[in-house]
Image (cartoon, coloured by chain):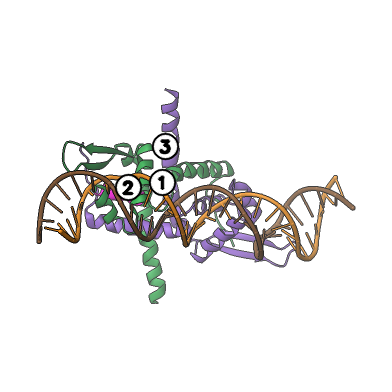
Chain colours: A green, B purple, C orange, D brown
Amino acid sequence: MKQKVMYSEVQCTKHINSVEDALYVLGGKWKLRIIIALFSGQTRFNELQRTIKGISARVLSNELKQLELNGLLTRVVHAEQTPIVVEYIYTEYATTLKDVVTALADWGEKHKKKLQLSYNV
Amino acid sequence: MKQKVMYSEVQCTKHINSVEDALYVLGGKWKLRIIIALFSGQTRFNELQRTIKGISARVLSNELKQLELNGLLTRVVHAEQTPIVVEYIYTEYATTLKDVVTALADWGEKHKKKLQLSYNV
DNA sequence: GTTACCACTAACCTTTTGTTTACTACTAAC
DNA sequence: GTTAGTAGTAAACAAAAGGTTAGTGGTAAC
């Protein structure tokens, strides 16, 4: 059983630490899904909750707060109108996540196709 | 407050579903770190536990089982030697994760640098 | 006049995840 | 003979994450 080594030990530790830093911000079940929904133009709380199937209001609220703290979105309150409308707008910084989202979504899609293939054969 | 829309609503749902499929396999605190350690040439249980700081034997054992079920590694037992040695070898299929790992590690690295900058200024 | 929408929050509960300690049984080094 | 390494597992517990239900107060549609 042979395999090629992709990184040195030092690079391994560096990679693990970097992924750790990324997961600190993006980890958990919901954060990336929320970011995708924001990228696709959803801005409102209830819109987001409808788009992201299965998330509860409590969890969505908490996750949005954390994403705001990490500089990935801005909470904009339109207090002048009734009912008061709140918009969640992704920041310029959040667009740096595009590669991450793309890589994960691509892999997830291919993985699903692979599973379907192995069941159908 | 303006933003460009990156995906249509249909693409949004597709992306969310794909990321969901990916996270089903890769989600949680440890799986990607284990994969990085495997990519860097670690093959043994205790080696992995030493490399991945903070993981307990129980959790490592569970995660390895799940990664094996999902076809990302093979458990190879060398029963002929004493003490019996077990090797965890990443599969060919696991190499399709390279882009995911790279994207996340790159983002994590940049994010850390950004944090350090904003503290030092 | 009842229902639904808006954007949440509080309290409580369950599930998932992870930790700690102790243990297996054998080997090799000091 | 004590310690450390080999690869784990069992049991008991703690912490983190997530879900459920109910409710706020105002507006607008049926």
- Tell me if label 2 and label 1 are in contact, CB under 8 Å: yes
Tell which subunit mark 3 falls on: B
Q: Determine whether, in the image, residue B112 is placed left or right of residue B5.
A: right
Residue type of the residue flagged with mark 1: Leu
Closer to the N terminus: mark 2 or mark 1? 1
Task: Point out which mark residue A95 bears.
Answer: none
Q: Is A31 placed left or right of B68 in the picture?
A: left
Query: Element under label 3?
Result: helix
* Residue B71 included in the magenta stretch of the image: no
Say above or below: B64 vs B106. Answer: below
Mark 2 sits on what residue?
A35
Element at label 2 = helix
Tell me the residue at 58%/44% (across/down).
Answer: A9
Under mark 2, the amino acid is Ile
Give the labeled residue for mark 3: B111
The chief SS type of the magenta part is helix
